[in-house]
Amino acid sequence: MSMPRPPLDRFGRDRTGQSETLAVLLLVALTVVGGGTVLMFGASAIDDATASVDVGKAEHAMTQLDSKTSLVAHGSSDTQRVDFGRTGRGTTAVDEDSGRMIVRIVNGTNGNETILDEQLGTVTYERGQTTLAYQGGGVWRRDGNGSTMVSPPEFHYQRGTLTLPLVRVESDGISGRSVRIVQRNETAGEFPNATRSNPLTKGRVHVTVQSDYYRAWGTYFEERTSGNVTYDHANESATIELITPFKGEFDNILASTGGSITANGGDPPTPSETGTDYPSADGRIESRIDDCLGGGCEGWTTDVDDAGTYYTESDVDNDITVDTSGGNVGLVVNGSFDPDSLDITGSNNVTVYVRDDAAFGEANAGGNPGDLRVLVHSSGEVDMDGNAVFVGLLYAPESEVDLNGKGTITGGLVGGNVDINGQPANDFDHDSRVQDVELDVGSGEPRVLYLHVSVTTVEIEDG
């Protein structure tokens, strides 16, 4: 006798057929989704690869433009042609107002002079987030906010000679497929010329570039000259400073690098000079402090009777006696220096390195001016009040100097701006024994003796 089927059994009779249908549907769905994903990522990869190829071709075209523009600008060819036609979906354009170069001589023989102030002009290729640019004789690349150099600009510094054969770019517009380069005018010599000559004998040369690629320009300046480069990020500019060779002579009783010697109650003492160019003492002072912090100096004492270098991190405001019979003595003060008296005996010299302010009661009174040299950091000021006496060379080219009362200086003083209160007559005496004192300052700064600046304008047109 057979048992009757359960009441719900009839609903499961086709379960096998339904499973096969669902499997097919799932397979189709996975295929569609997988194919779409592959297509999406594959298309993105292909686009990235295409962009990379386009930028590579454009970079090659820009370096060709650099080379061929140089040929035209410097007279090796009347015209040259560059093909941009196979650089994909990027756009090529010329902006003749983009970029600027300014060359100035500060505190030179003729005071402050602007030698050059010219627009550079820029040829650009843009593809996505990448921009390639020909500017100032170099090729630059920008990806997002950063910039790098592809090929160097027309800026050549070697053995004290700076050569700037600037190439300016002008254009009425280009279509972007191919361009022709022609020289628009003769090369104009900005320095030297009929009124300006080499060698440079004083001052500092500042070269400033304002550009979308200023960071890369600044990096190139640093690498090419090992000099001090400053950045003005608000104005997108980089400036390199080169100084004229330091003559190393102190032939004035007072010299002001800041351009000002004011004397209340009379004329400045003679011989004096304003607008002089002496290198900073900062590097030398900081180097001596670093040497001492590394254990290369003796502990501080106010009664020095052996040759060597002595160091303190405290302010100095008491009497000091130094006997140099055994050799030269260095006093490194990582603080302020305001001794009541500094007495020197012996046949050698004393050099004082001051990190902060300097002031004097009596320093080397009655001694040889060539035996005392005091170097003051730019973070410090110099004061002499009352009947102070200083006999030696006081070197503070970036400091404010206040001379009050009826003090006496014998030797020489170099300051930033010098302010004299009281009667200077008979209180200041230059001594030739300080004239050739060796300070070993500014040795790491790049020097410029010969300057050659010219400008050539080229036209970029459809070709």
Image (spheres, rainbow, N blue to C red):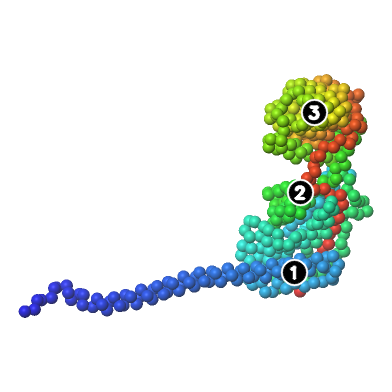
Could you tell me how far apart the alpha carbons at marks 2 and 3 are, in whole angstroms?
A: 32 Å
Q: Are marks 2 and 3 in contact (CB under 8 Å)?
A: no
Name the foreground residue: 392 vs 135: 392
Q: Which mark is residue 363?
A: none
As shown in the figure, which amino acid type bears the numbered disc 2?
Answer: Gly
Could you tell me how far apart the alpha carbons at marks 3 and 1 are, in whole angstroms?
A: 59 Å
Secondary structure found at label 1: helix
Q: Position of residue 367 (x, y in %)?
A: 87, 24
Q: Residue furthest right?
A: 194
Q: Closer to us: mark 2 or mark 1? A: 2
Residue 293 location, quadrant: top right
Residue at left 77%, top 62%?
137
Residue position for label 2:
227
Residue 330 location, quadrant: top right
Residue position for label 1:
64
Could you tell me how far apart the alpha carbons at marks 2 and 1 are, in whole angstroms?
A: 30 Å
Q: Position of residue 258 (x, y in %)?
A: 81, 37
Relative to 446, does residue 397 appear above or below in the rendering? above
For label 2, count other residues whose C-alpha is less than 10 Å away and answer few (under 14), some (14-19) or many (20+). Answer: some
Secondary structure found at label 3: strand
Name the foreground residue: 339 vs 47: 339
Name the foreground residue: 99 vs 401: 401
Quarter of the rendering occupied by the N terminus: bottom left
- Mark 3 or mark 1: whose residue is earlier in sequence: 1
Question: Seen in the image, is 49 located left or right of residue 392?
Answer: left
Secondary structure found at label 2: loop
Q: Residue furthest left?
A: 1
